[in-house]
Image (cartoon, coloured by chain):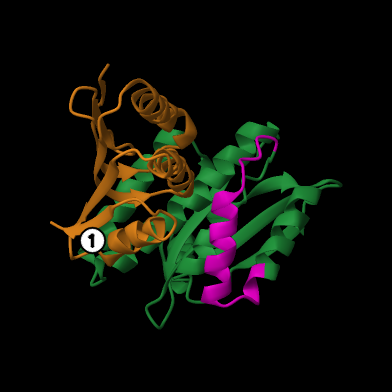
Chain colours: A orange, B green
Amino acid sequence: MNLMLNATQSTPAISADWDSGVLSMSGDSYPENAFEMYADVIKWVEDFLSNKESPLSLELSLLYLNTSSIKSVMDVFDLIEDAFQNGREVSVRWYYEESNERVSELAEEFKEDCSFPFHILEK
Amino acid sequence: MILPNLYNLREQLAEERILLCFNGPISRSLIEEIGVALKKYLQAEPLTPASASDVFAVYIELTQNIRHYSENTKLVGSDVATVIVSQNLEGHYAVSAGNLLYHNDGEVLVKHINDLASLDKIALKKLYKEQLRKPRDVTATTGAGLGIIDMARKASKPLKAELKSVSQDISFYSVSVQL
């Protein structure tokens, strides 16, 4: 089961591929109700982790996140962290552009709370 | 017909170095449209992308807080937002926002903001991480969890907030965040 959401002004493009186990999110994320939007992402990650055994990789090029999006993304990382603690192969790659250090600072703060492989990479 | 006193308004906006102001019922789409205008304006200014990003972030948090409060409480008139983006003489940007709320909620908010004023950046980060880890309080009306701490972290000075009583249990709440 794949997930595909087009980007809007305030929401990122999201795609999740069941066969390859890649979840990608890119763009700004500041919807008024972030919890509703991320509920689909969380559901997909939960389903993938419980129904498949193959690795899960997140490919992120997220830019600005409002605080409710930050909380939602943290929920996604918590799921991944639990799976990692149970021996699952998982990873996050967060891409940023050098010009805006706020993006890499944001990624760094998430990384502090995660023990799975978390790469912050300049584009 | 009365011609509005545009000159006085213009003078006042100029005197207070107000770059953008809005007063009226705020909707999800208006927040986004004004946000786009603000972003474009900031891009044209001699600002680093990080500073522009901070001004935008504070604008979004403040206006979305008003929307959440209004949606949760259904308090009549609480969706009317007064929003200002200004620049002081040293070039610092400030985002200020105000709306009507129940006086009791306002007191909680103002106290919270004043409590944050004494914390340094390290203490604010610690508090931010704690708040990030707390389960969501679905009954919270102010939604004033992570957002206010996040703004305090971005601000160059402690946040300022005040209440002006407008009736027995309703006040006008204003908050200003200097970047």
- A2 or B176: nearer the viewer: A2
* Residue at which label 1 appears: B43
Q: Is residue A6 visible?
A: no
Would residue B118 appear left or right of B19 to someone viewing this image?
right
Per the image, label 1 sits on a secondary structure element best described as helix
Residue B18 place in picture, x, y as percent: 43, 65
Q: Which residue is most to the left?
A: A123
What residue type is disc 1 on? Gln
Would residue B47 appear left or right of A87 to someone viewing this image?
left
Q: Is residue B63 visible?
A: yes
Residues rendered magenta in the picture: B116-139
- Which of the chains bears the disc numbered 1? B
Q: Main secondary structure of the magenta part?
A: helix
- B128 or A22: nearer the viewer: A22
Residue B6 place in picture, x, y as percent: 44, 56
Callout 1: 10 Å neighbours few (<14), some, many (20+)? some
Decide whether residue B117 is among the magenta residues.
yes
Q: Which residue is most to the bottom?
A: B90
